[in-house]
Amino acid sequence: MNSSKITSDLLPKKFGKAGFVWTALLVVLCLIGLYGYYRQVTLGLGVTGMRDYASWGIYISNFVFFVAISLVGSLITAIFRLAGAEWRTPITRISEIIAVSSILFASIIIIVDMGRPERFYHLFFYGRLQSPIMWDVIVITTYLTISVLFLYFPLLPDIPILIKNSKPGSFVQKIYKFLGSFWIGTAAQFKISENAIKIISVMIIPIALAIHTVTSWLFATTYRPGWDSTNFGAYFVSGAFLVGAGGVVVAMYVFRKAYQLEAYITDKHFNNMSKIVVMLALLYLYFNINEYLVPAFKMKKAEEHHLHSLFMGDFALLFWSAIILGMIVPIIVLLFPKGRKPVPAFLMGVLVVVGAWFKRFLIVTPTMLSPFLPMYDVPESYKHYMPTWEEWAITIGSLAGTLLIITIFTRLFPIIPIHETIEEMEHSKQETV
């Protein structure tokens, strides 16, 4: 396979009919979400299902999910790059754009949850470092900045290729020239870029661990049943790596089918990523056992109500489905070589991602409905939480917005690095000779 063939295969393609339908669907879902948010801003948080006790709902569940799946950028790109895993190349940019789009909407969904968006600037002008919420603001802002740089720097060598193969004077070419106006492709520039990527690779790993650890502290520093745990940091981080790896497997399959990338995203990539998913699912299952075994052994009164609601109560079906379908079934299927083929791996990735979203919902809602002080003399609606259509619209709209960013990105930029792929091909030829 020569360089011209690689370039033509990996250049971004124009949308076909299916692409336009997919994009239109995402735009419609985003607009419905915006209308739901308009109603929430004008009418207040009373349009949601949140009340005095369940003051956090699917917005916070969605926030934790976005933060979790964003860790895939550091897992795939930084850790694998530093480890010298050469097979990572076709999936690095996939993981990077997932990370950037997810952390961006994690920030947006927090503003939605505030109820009073005009007070958002208070976090920056009147923030107090004693507050764990301020820690989260700092680490999310830092992680978003580094993730954008981590996406941008490896993209630079592809910019001249994109300029050369785009229509002269077109809007798209102007975007390319703006982004890569300073990039000439000299040896000095490549050396600076490589050093910058190495530095960011080292920096992003502790920041990635910090972002989900700090998010877990928002819960753990709040004195409530189910959150009063020193296990929460490791519990959140392990779950984040799992959903991130599952999300990459899903994205690999979708891009492979949509852009005919079978020659670049091969069975080897699905096999390797599936093994990683198994390892991370076992790790997350271990921390889940830790999370529930110790409180179940002590069985404090408030913890008893919380655990009963999860294991046998109102949330039991959701809880056991998330555990069995989101962790145990993927482990069993992906342990076998046939299960690590593209189609079964894709299906297991979907189970991991969907199970992870509902697992975040189970971290938030059952705890809010299991306060240390029992609920007396309150309306019946306070004892339950059911999201309203506005909440569902905003939540689905935010998920659609994440996918829309990824979709637009793949229309403008190669989802597999062209220059890096050509370099690897030439390097392998030299080794063969």
Image (spheres, grey):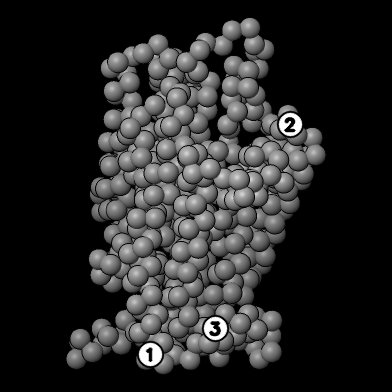
**Could you tell me the amino acid type at mark 3?**
Gly
Expressed as whole percent of the image width and height from the top left, the position of residue 171 reads 69, 81
Give the side of residue 126 with respect to residue 263, left or right: right
Say few, some or many: other residues with alpha carbon within 10 Å of mark 3 (under 14 / 14 to 19 / 20 or more): some
Q: Is residue 86 in view from this perspective?
A: yes
Q: Which residue is mark 2?
A: 47
Give the side of residue 405 with respect to residue 432, left or right: right
**Could you tell me the amino acid type at mark 1?**
Ala
Discs 1/3, front: 1
Q: CA distance from mark 1 to mark 3?
A: 16 Å
**Could you tell me the amino acid type at mark 2?**
Val
Say few, some or many: other residues with alpha carbon within 10 Å of mark 1 (under 14 / 14 to 19 / 20 or more): few
Q: Secondary structure at mark 1?
A: helix
Q: Secondary structure at mark 2?
A: helix
Report if the CB atoms under discs 1 and 3 are less than 8 Å apart.
no
Mark found first going from the N terminus, 2 or 3: 2
Depth check: give the residue in front, 70 or 138: 138
Tell me: residue 351, above or below residue 26. above
Expressed as whole percent of the image width and height from the top left, the position of residue 208 reads 39, 54
Give the side of residue 339 with respect to residue 258, left or right: left
Say few, some or many: other residues with alpha carbon within 10 Å of mark 2 (under 14 / 14 to 19 / 20 or more): some
Q: Quadrant of residue 233?
A: top left
Depth check: give the residue in front, 249 or 361: 361
Q: Is residue 250 in view from this perspective?
A: no
Q: Which residue is mark 1?
A: 188
Q: Which residue is mark 3?
A: 180
